[in-house]
Image (tube, rainbow, N blue to C red):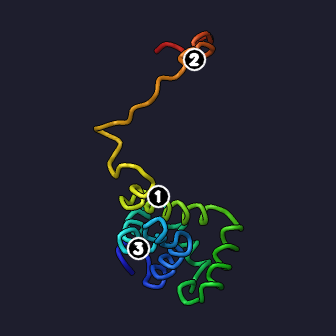
Amino acid sequence: MTDTGLSPQERRDLRCIAGLMIPASTAFKVPGADDPKIFADIEKSLGRDLADVRKALATLAGMADMDDAKAGAAAEAFRAAGGAPVAALERSILQCYYRDDRVVISLGLEARPPFPLGHTLEQGDWSLLDPVRKRAKMWRDA
């Protein structure tokens, strides 16, 4: 077992699933989700999703040993079934993929945190809040 709680086989299957879910693209010059840097972030970030990810991996056991067609079909059937393990697996992969600087840059964004520079927002129509302002008080004073 690794310090994340995943066995070597679970790690291999997770990496295979990540690569199937988001393959590398030469057209967009981005790595796949199975890239070593991204995969290390996925493993490190499992946290509260670890139990559900392990359930997903138990269902998809041996995926890394299948050919691409069988692995893809198994992953698609698993995804269609839905549920907490599917959501946890997808969330774990996607959140780490889209916070990788290479991916952020390929989307035309700056690879930086939103603060302290912040982002400029256009001023909207503040009159849209008038109905809310006119409502009666919905709370009681302390």
Nearer the observer, 2 or 80: 80
Residue 6 vertical placement versus 139 (above, below):
below
Which amino acid does the dot numbered 1 rest on?
Answer: Gln
Residue 31 vertical placement versus 66 (above, below):
above
Identify the residue at the far front of this view. Answer: 27
Nearer the observer, 8 or 111: 111
Which amino acid does the dot numbered 2 rest on?
Answer: Leu
Q: How crowded is mark 2: few (under 14 residues within 10 Å), some or many (20 or more)?
A: few
Point 41% across, 71% down: residue: 39
Labels 2, 3: front one: 3
Which amino acid does the dot numbered 3 rest on?
Answer: Asp
The image position of residue 51, as x and y in percent, is: 51, 67
The dot on residue 19 is none
Circle 2 sits on which residue?
Answer: 129
Residue 108 vertical placement versus 87 (above, below):
above
Point 68% across, 79% down: residue: 73
Circle 1 sits on which residue?
Answer: 95
Circle 3 sits on which residue?
Answer: 35
Q: Earlier in the sequence, mark 2 or mark 1?
A: 1
The image position of residue 103, as x and y in percent, is: 42, 60
Say what secondary structure mark 1 lies in: helix
Say what secondary structure mark 2 lies in: helix
